[in-house]
Structures are given as C-alpha cells and as structure tokens.
Amino acid sequence: MGFRDVVLGIDSHDAFQAISNAIAWPRYRHLLDKIREVRSGFDSVTFEHESTYSNSIARDIARSVTQDGRFHSYFALGGPAWLHNMIQEEAISNVC
C-alpha cells in the first residue's frame, strides 16, 4: 500500500508491554521477532496504548475477519453495512 510511517493502536495492556519490552516476555519471542521483522519494512512504526472502548470498531472488524473466515480484505468492496452504521454512530456521538 506504500505506507512508510505507521501508528498502531493496541488495547491489550500485556501486548503493549510485550512489544515495548520484548526481553521481558520470552514466551512470546517468536511473535515478537515477527513483529520486529515486519517493523523493519517501514520508516517509522509507533505503538500506542488505546482503551478497549476507543478500539471497539477495530476489534469488531478483526472478529468478523476471523469468525467469518474473511482473510482477504472485504473493505475494497465497500465493507459490511454494520461497519458503516457503527462508524456513523461513533461520529454522531463524538459531535454531540
């Protein structure tokens, strides 16, 4: 997609801690090494800790992908109706 600078929001405190201090999490070394490998393909990668509430749409997208077996992006086709509704509701609640 051509992105060079990436900011990722993580709502799991433990995952955020593991990425921030990989040496303290040897059990997940394989996954953390993979994250480090992927990071090297970008000019800048920043991880931010998010609240579960503020990350709810991203969680729902991930859940729909894994539960429904949609391993190819279905957003290129406009995305599902439930997502459009959630984004609209969130936008309205942030304006008021």
Image (spheres, rainbow, N blue to C red):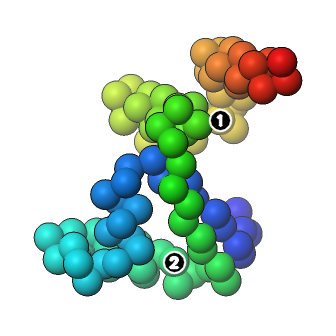
The amino acid marked with disc number 1 is Phe
Q: Residue at x 71, y 75 (%)?
A: 4
Residue appearing at x 57%, y 81% in the figure: 41
Percent x, y for residue 73? 57, 41
Does residue 14 sit above or below 82 in this rendering? below
Is 17 displayed left or right of 74 in the figure?
Answer: left
Q: How crowded is mark 2: few (under 14 residues within 10 Å), some or many (20 or more)?
A: some
Of all residues shown, which one is farthest toward the right? 95
Say left or right for 84 vs 58.
Answer: right
Residues under numbered marks 2 and 1 in contact, where contact means CB atoms less than 8 Å apart: no
Element at label 2: helix
Residue 63 point in image, percent of width and height: 41, 32
Q: Name the residue under label 1.
A: 75
Q: Which of marks 2 and 1 is nearer the N terminus?
A: 2
Residue 96: image quadrant is top right
Q: Would residue 90 be found to the left or right of residue 20 on screen?
A: right
Kindly state the secondary structure of the residue where label 1 is placed.
Answer: loop
Tag in front: 2 or 1:
2
Real-space Cα separation, disc 2 to disc 1, in angstroms: 24 Å
Say few, some or many: other residues with alpha carbon within 10 Å of mark 1 (under 14 / 14 to 19 / 20 or more): few
Residue at position x 51%, y 56% in the image:
49
* Residue under pointer 2: 39
Could you say where residue 75 lies in the image, as x and y percent from the top left? 65, 35
Residue 21, quarter of the rendered image? bottom left
Q: Which amino acid does label 2 sit on?
A: Arg
